[in-house]
Image (cartoon, grey):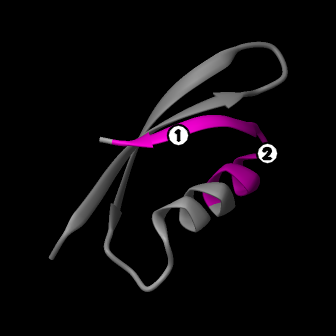
Amino acid sequence: MKIHVAQILVWNGRTFQFIDFHQTQTQESLGSVIREYVGEMGVRLVYWRKV
């Protein structure tokens, strides 16, 4: 089983936060899953990169 690892930079309205993100391989692209995840958190996605 392959695991994707990414670093996400988000803005919560007051500060920037780095989040380490781990996801097992699915049919959805990693970018789509990250955008969905960030949307559920209620913060703004600034940048993400695959590690």
In the image: residue 19, left or right of residue 1: right
Instruction: Specify the amino acid type for callout 2.
Output: Gly
Residue at image point 38% right, 45% down: 6
Looking at the rendered structure, the kind of residue marked 1 is: Trp
**Percent from the top left, x then y, of residue 27?**
44, 86
Coordinates of residue 3 in the picture (x, y in percent): 24, 63
Residue at the image point whose x is 76% and y is 38% from the top: 43
Q: Residue at x 65, y 31 (%)?
A: 10
Question: In the rendered view, does 43 fall on the left or right side of 4?
Answer: right
Which residue is label 1 attached to? 48
**Number of residues whose C-alpha sits closer than 10 Å to that of mark 2, classed few (under 14), some (14–19) or many (20 or more):** few
Q: Nearer the viewer, residue 41 or 2?
A: 2
Q: Is residue 11 magenta?
A: no
Q: Residue furthest left?
A: 1
Residues drawn in magenta: 37-50
Where in the figure is residue 20, as x and y percent of width and height? 40, 37
Which label is found at residue 10?
A: none
Q: Mark 2 — residue?
A: 42
